[in-house]
Amino acid sequence: MNAPFLPPRTVAATAEPGCGDVAIRQERGQRAVFCGLTGIVWLHRKIQDAFFLVVGSRTCAHLIQSAAGVMIFAEPRFATAIIDERDLAGIADMNEELDRVVRRLIERRPDIRLLFLVGSCPSEVIKLDLGRAAQRLSTTFSPDVRVLSYSGSGIETTFTQGEDACLAALVPEMPREAPDAAPSLLVAGALADVVEDQFLRLFSELGIANVAFLPARRAGALPAVGPSTTFLLAQPFLTDTAKALEARGAKRLSAPFPLGVEGTTRWLRAAADAWGVPEGRFEAATAPGRARAARALDHHRETLAGKRVFFFPDSQLEVPLARFLSRELGMGLCEVGTPYLHRGHLAEDLALLPDGTDIVEGQSLDAQMDRARAERPDLTVCGLGLANPLEAEGLATKWSIELLFTPIQGYDQAGDLAELFARPLVRRTRLEV
Amino acid sequence: MQLTLWTYEGPPHIGAMRVATAMEGLHYVLHAPQGDTYADLLFTMIERRDARPPVTYTTFQARDLGSDTAEIFKDAAAAAYERFRPQAMIVGASCTAELIQDDPGGLAKALNLPIPVIALELPAYQKKENWGASETFYRLVRGLSGSPSPEPKPEGRRPSCNILGPTALGFRHRDDLDEITGLLERLGIAVNVVAPMGASPADLGRLKDADFNVVLYPEVARAAAQYLQKTFGQPMVETVPIGVGATIRFVEEVAALAGIDPAPVLAGAPSRAPWYSRSVDSTYLTGKRIFIFGDATHAIAAARVAKAELGFRVVGLGTYGREFAREVRAEAALHGIEALISDDYLDVEAAIQAAGPELVLGTQMERHIAKRLGLPCAVISAPVHVQDFPARYSPQMGFEGANVLFDTWVHPLMMGLEEHLLGMFREDPEFNDRAPSHLGGKAPAGAPAPAPPVPEPVTSVTLAGPTAPTWAVEAEKELRKIPFFVRGKARTNTETFARERALPLITVETLYDAKAHFGR
């Protein structure tokens, strides 16, 4: 991540012959990104009987509340166990305190089946062993509640990495597949339910029947995994999850991420090839989706083509988004900032970027804002904190957190994804004040 | 360790940010991990500020912990000085950096910057946002206001005061400041310095030139004003001018300190609120049961206005600000109730349910609680939401503020005549009390024709408890004849009445006995 400053270097992209090289620069300095706790905001909606208990400070509680925007849930399925001075001074035994808080929580919420203890910066710094606490509490509440732990701390995780840590914590819980299990496909990465259902239909038309998703919608419905499992990543930030799946014997299929027509087609094709789906069947299964998506993208091409986009590092979706915007909508790429990137998982997307694309890994906020001001991009993709200041300087912006809350993957969301970028530009042409 | 679902206040460094962001020419270097940068969006999204807060975060990472986080802090502070060239700097740590004990104050001092650098000690595991704002403002005033000047103030000059307290992200601070500045100007009192909002570190050096200090928000400015009183002998006005009565008292107090006559400013009818309250349509407001929760300043002011200026009955009063618990308890005693001092959102929800109010005056949290309970609500205090920064002028303070209070508290209730008409026409076949309501009830799906009894919003959240008495069919029918906007209350009261008397069955008799018992 924050490696010492290195001179620009070139990574040879290997996935596809004929595609060019991209420069990946590393930058270090002040960052303006969320920590991994933020992932709780979408993960708790996805796993419907899970509860996320952050063990942290008032800052953690305030962050999740602010990132969630509105307090719309009577009792949300997340909370913070706020460490106070009594805990730090050793007056209270922190493990006993944690057990007390968890007991109170489980009494209040008997519907909880899976409880995540989520580590934070303070809990990491004081080396509170949440893994051991989770084991202890799991024994206490077995079989009604399973207790797991992961870290969403800002000293270890950036924004979407929190999802990676959470899913990686689920992998050891997945049942072992039967020794004679038929080949199965696992899609890893939280997707909207509607997108999962669309993909299930597509896989079924391709003749791939044995498909499961991680995370599952319910804690008890985790799919089995083993050497007969092949997996596709649906999100580009799942470094540890992929590692954990591979350790269970599963094999990763290399593909661009399923954003836009091209990304979705190549992603599906990776599975189709692994299953030996005949070309004709693949064509037939994907043609209607490709045609619909192409029509949907046409609506936005006029607005976006030829416009230049600048990415501040945030969601780690930046590389596949840049690929989508440049190849399917004709946008020019200024700087593509990303908090960190996994060169292996992103190889296919990197290979599809135009020659000489300027990728910056890491961040030095003030320097980057200066570069954005100098470039005057037509559209700047950035975090919530920066959007209004950049707008006030005359730069149109798209806040990137929406890319995690909105269904954007697959053929039938390609138009919605383009619309997210087109809307700020269209809005500017409408306003006369 | 405290289990927290939603929090009323952020950590204390957020309070420091509210002060720094309100000021000009001040920069805050905060030793903090990357996630803490979320705080920017409080200012740029909720308050719609057009610039980043003047804050540099060190954003250290786990790998830095083993090596030298102190060096990262020094580099960040030096770079921030070079880039922003502030007149003064505040330095401190967020919760995580507090644990690694790098001493930002000492490190910054070692840099020998050519500007004042003020170190903040904001214990994140004990204190909260408002305390952090108060402490930061106090440290700034202490560090930058200089020493008493030996020369006496020149004769014959206009009396002047400082206005202390308004910050960034404050509930209506922007408009309150406009309103009170205008009021002081009409009185002939010059405003010497407003701080923190709009003040530079150099301006804090001029605080001592004023004759007295106006403390608009005691949560933020009381400590600083006490320091100024002690050091420069400046009296302070702590009457918070929310409501007509308090505004008149405020005018009289500042006029007395300035040695001028308040009569011209108080003449006539400086606010419409008293007449609106006396006009006949407002009769129906009499004795409305109000639950109030917020920061201490706004909660206490709201209780006084509700009682004396709108004729409401305060059935609940509380604050999340423990620092001001004493004042809130004293005010609650005047209403014959016990104050709720808590920052546990679930406690507040339970207290609102138990009090069964007809209107909730609270924060954004209580707005959500009220929505779930199907109760009308108006927001009177931080924590804030993007809606609390309206485009229009909407002060809470001064005479215009009193008009705003009348409108925003009364509009969520049904208007007087409308309420009577609903009562009169309730039996008409056209009348359908399950129509969509602005009070948050659910519209029935499908045809409006006689639907099977749908639980209403209010009753659906009533805590039945294991000992809930049952309703006789006749009594249940009779209950449905009671206007829907008081039906929930009638149900709760009747059940309480029955439970207290250990009546297993609620009959029509019980219903009316309870009505007589609780009748006001």
Image: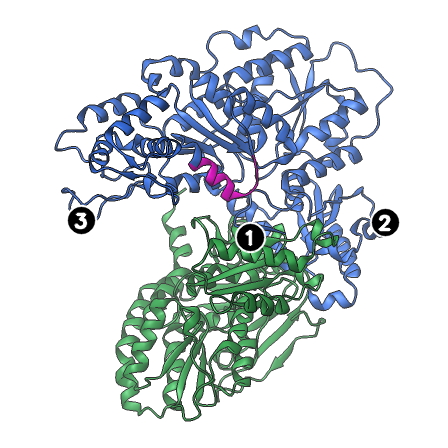
Spatial CA distance of label 1 from label 2 is 31 Å
Using the image, determine if residue A209 lies above or below residue B389: below
Residue B446's tag is 3
Chain B colour? Answer: blue
Find the magenta span and give its range: B341-353
Q: Chain of mark 2?
A: B
Observer-side mark, 2 or 3, equals: 3
Identify the amino acid type marked 1: Gly
The kind of residue tagged 3 is Gly
Residue A233 in picture, x, y percent from top left: 46, 78
Question: Where A283 sits versus A3, above or below?
Answer: below
**Where residue A385 is drawn, which disc sits there?**
1
| Mark 1 secondary-structure assignment | helix
Q: Position of residue B59 (x, y in %)?
A: 68, 59
Q: CA distance from mark 2 to mark 3?
A: 73 Å
Q: Is residue A294 above or below residue B324?
A: below
Q: Which residue is mark 2?
A: B112
Q: Amino acid at mark 2?
A: Asn
Q: Secondary structure at mark 3?
A: loop
Residue A161 visible, this angle: no
Chain shaded green:
A
- At horizontal 65% and vertical 53% (from top left) the residue drawn is A83
Tag 2 secondary structure: loop
Residue B31: image quadrant is bottom right
Asked whether the residues under marks 1 and 2 belong to the same chain, the reply is no
Between disc 3 and disc 1, the foreground one is: 3
Circle 1 packing at 10 Å, graded few (<14), some (14-19), many (20+), is: many
Q: Chain of mark 3?
A: B
* Residues marked 1 and 2 touching at CB (< 8 Å): no
Where residue A405 appears, as percent x and y from the top left, is 43, 61
